[in-house]
């Protein structure tokens, strides 16, 4: 059953179950909704890097921090489409285009639409992450055929002010609502390892799981270390079992959503990734590069899936979610 009325207490109780019981519950739910041997693959491209006016304390692309990331202009649509072709050949099913913007300018919308159309024509699913959108901008991306929009809440409502001051959680939730109402699938998750408490992590998932409809896709990122950002001083290594517990909780609270094991996999062992797949993660980014940081080599990922008798396939829910 898909529920959007989870309470924090319920989530805490599930989260603190004995590990075998938690994994069993997550696996049982995972198998009712998905093929447990299938992993979805997405590839990322930074279509406009750095120089961002937002002050997100974790991000290499903010103009407020000295991180050494060089600011670039918005790429040409043809170059983006050429990169998508390579990503498809390398095994990606979805192509996610990210821009270091607070929000796109209306004058950029035609070029963004051209990118969406060109990437779709290659037979790839399309995703963009461009910052805050107006309903008109959502409509423009929808008419170009955009399938997914990524817009993360990043952390709990309680911790949010400690990670960014130029935007609020409510700003994020507003764009998510515009995207959903505009008929584009929502990809929304967060980051672990930024000095937040276990309570914050649970609260972030409860926030997602009590939206009027669950995000179609939930990225769980470990904070990828970048030099020169404020979060560096607070960042903590995430305990591997804490990560698995959180993935399991995401799977249980949002049974029909795809859970993506996103940034931070370069530091994870094969065994930890396998445990995350058992706990319900069913999507990864493939390709050496995320936006400005590294990701494992694609051959390593495919070899791991092969060793586990798993395969890549677009995630398809078995049941139609009554959301
Ligand atoms: N500017 C747009 C926005 O913030 O919505 C889109 C690009 S932004 C880089 C997309 C997401 O990447 C952020 O919301 C955050 O969750 C994630 N992110 C950024 N830096 C990260 C890092 N160092 N480690 C893990 N995730 C990160
Ligand atoms: C998401 O949740 N993770 C991706 C995607 N959405 C856009 C971004 C990860 C970025 C990692 C830091 C970087 O490479 O700059
Ligand atoms: Fe800009 Fe997005 Fe990075 Fe924040 S997370 S600084 S909005 S690119």
Image (cartoon, rainbow, N blue to C red):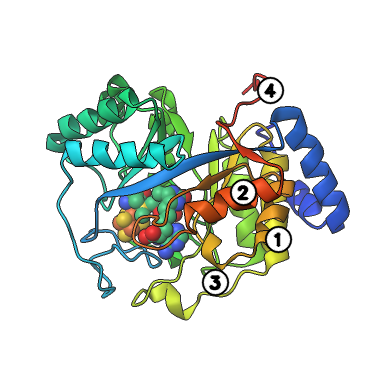
Q: Quadrant of the C terminus?
A: top right
| Disc 3: CA contacts within 10 A as few (<14), some (14-19) or many (>=20) | some
Q: Earlier in the sequence, mark 1 or mark 4?
A: 1
Q: Position of residue 155 (x, y in %)?
A: 52, 57
Mark number for residue 271? Answer: 1
Q: Position of residue 160 (x, y in %)?
A: 47, 59
Q: Which quadrant holds residue 144?
A: top left
Mark number for residue 318? Answer: 4
Residue closer to the observer: 179 or 185: 185
Calculate the distance from the C-alpha at mark 2 to the C-alpha at mark 3: 16 Å
Q: Quadrant of ligand 3?
A: bottom left
Q: Earlier in the sequence, mark 3 or mark 4?
A: 3
Calculate the distance from the C-alpha at mark 2 to the C-alpha at mark 4: 23 Å
Query: Which of labels 2 and 4 is toward the front?
Result: 4
Are the residues tagged 1 and 4 within 8 Å (C-beta)?
no
Which residue is depicted at the point 25% across and 25% down?
140
Query: Which of labels 3 and 1 is toward the front?
Result: 1
Which residue is depicted at the point 31% across and 30% down?
119
Q: Quadrant of the N terminus?
A: top right
Q: Which residue is mark 2?
A: 205
Q: Which residue is mark 3?
A: 195
Element type at marker 3?
loop
Are the residues tagged 2 and 3 within 8 Å (C-beta)?
no
**Side (left or right) of 211 relative to 170:** right
User: Does mark 4 have its CB less than 8 Å from ligand 2?
Assistant: no
Element type at marker 4?
loop
């Amino acid at each position: 059953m898909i529920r959007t009325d989870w309470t924090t207490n319920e989530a805490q109780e599930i989260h603190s179950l004995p590990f075998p019981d938690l994994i069993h519950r997550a696996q049982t739910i995972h198998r009712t909704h998905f093929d447990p041997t299938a992993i979805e693959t997405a590839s990322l491209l930074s279509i406009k890097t750095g120089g961002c006016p937002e002050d997100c304390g974790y991000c290499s692309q903010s103009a407020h921090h000295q991180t050494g990331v060089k600011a670039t202009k918005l790429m040409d649509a043809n170059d983006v489409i050429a990169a998508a072709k390579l990503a498809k050949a390398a095994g990606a099913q979805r192509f996610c285009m990210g821009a270091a913007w607070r929000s796109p300018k209306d004058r950029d919308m035609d070029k963004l639409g051209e990118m969406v159309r060109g990437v779709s024509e290659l037979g790839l699913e399309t995703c963009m992450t461009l910052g805050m959108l107006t309903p008109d901008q959502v409509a423009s991306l929808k008419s170009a055929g955009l399938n997914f929009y990524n817009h993360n809440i990043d952390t709990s409502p309680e911790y949010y002010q400690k990670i960014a001051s130029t935007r609020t959680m409510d700003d994020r939730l507003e764009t998510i609502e515009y995207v959903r109402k505009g008929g584009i699938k929502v990809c929304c998750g967060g980051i672990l390892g930024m000095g937040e408490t276990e309570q914050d992590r649970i609260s972030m998932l409860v926030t997602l799981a009590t939206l009027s409809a669950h995000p179609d896709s939930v990225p769980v990122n470990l904070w990828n270390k970048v030099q020169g950002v404020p979060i560096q001083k607070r960042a903590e290594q995430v305990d591997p079992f804490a990560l698995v517990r959180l993935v399991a909780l995401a799977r249980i609270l949002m049974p029909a959503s795809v859970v993506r094991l996103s940034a931070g996999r370069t530091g994870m062992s094969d065994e930890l990734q396998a445990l995350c797949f058992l706990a319900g993660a069913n999507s990864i980014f493939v390709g050496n590069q995320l936006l400005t940081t590294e990701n494992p080599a694609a051959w390593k990922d495919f070899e791991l899936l092969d060793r586990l008798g798993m395969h890549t396939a677009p995630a398809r829910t078995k049941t139609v979610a009554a959301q």
